[in-house]
Image (cartoon, grey):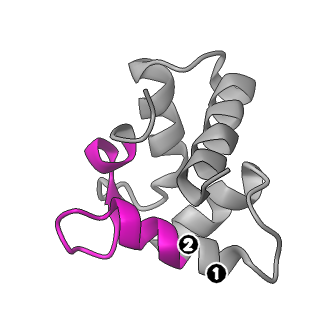
């Protein structure tokens, strides 16, 4: 299983558990839950909390997961993840 497959599977499981499904509404609720400052971006610390709740990695590996996730998902170079960038992997 690839990095992205594992990440998606666990985020989808978190969405189902917390928001009852995998759709645009659930994705928006997931995003706003972790966008602590409401700036429309998930930064590294916010993503680390999401990944911890999704049981991605562990305390030792989570920083690496965050770094790689941001590298792969951040298309605009902001070093954060927007809702539209996150949506590209959740289908």
Q: Quadrant of residue 84?
A: top left
**Magenta segment includes 48:** no
Residue 29 in sight in this render: yes
Categorize mark 1 by other alpha carbons within 10 Å: few (<14), some (14-19), many (20+). some
Q: Residue at x 33, y 45 (%)?
A: 83
Label 2, on which residue?
66
Please state the horizontal and vertical placement of residue 13, each as a whole percent of the image: 71, 32
Judged from the image, the secondary structure of the residue bearing numbered disc 1 is helix
Q: Is residue 27 left or right of residue 87?
A: right
Work out which quarter of the rendered image holds the C terminus and state it. Answer: top left
Q: Is residue 75 left or right of residue 24?
A: left
Query: Furthest-left residue in view?
Result: 76
Residue 42 in sight in this render: no
Q: Residue at x 42, y 69 (%)?
A: 70
Q: Quadrant of residue 78?
A: bottom left
Label 1, on which residue?
63
Q: Residue at x 30, y 59 (%)?
A: 39
Q: Nearer the viewer, residue 34 or 10?
A: 10
Q: Residue at x 50, y 78 (%)?
A: 67
Which range is magenta?
Answer: 67-86
Judged from the image, the secondary structure of the residue bearing numbered disc 2 is helix
Query: Furthest-front residue in view?
Result: 1
Tag 2–tag 1 contact (CB < 8 Å):
yes
**Magenta segment includes 71:** yes
């Amino acid at each position: 299983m690839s990095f992205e497959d594992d990440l998606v599977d666990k985020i989808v499981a978190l969405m189902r558990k917390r928001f009852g499904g995998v759709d645009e509404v659930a994705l928006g609720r997931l995003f706003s839950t972790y966008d602590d400052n409401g700036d429309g971006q998930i930064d590294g610390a916010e993503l680390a909390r999401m990944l911890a709740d999704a049981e991605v990695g562990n305390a030792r590996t989570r920083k690496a997961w965050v770094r790689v996730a941001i590298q792969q998902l951040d298309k605009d170079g902001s070093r954060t993840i927007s809702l539209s960038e996150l949506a590209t992997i959740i289908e």
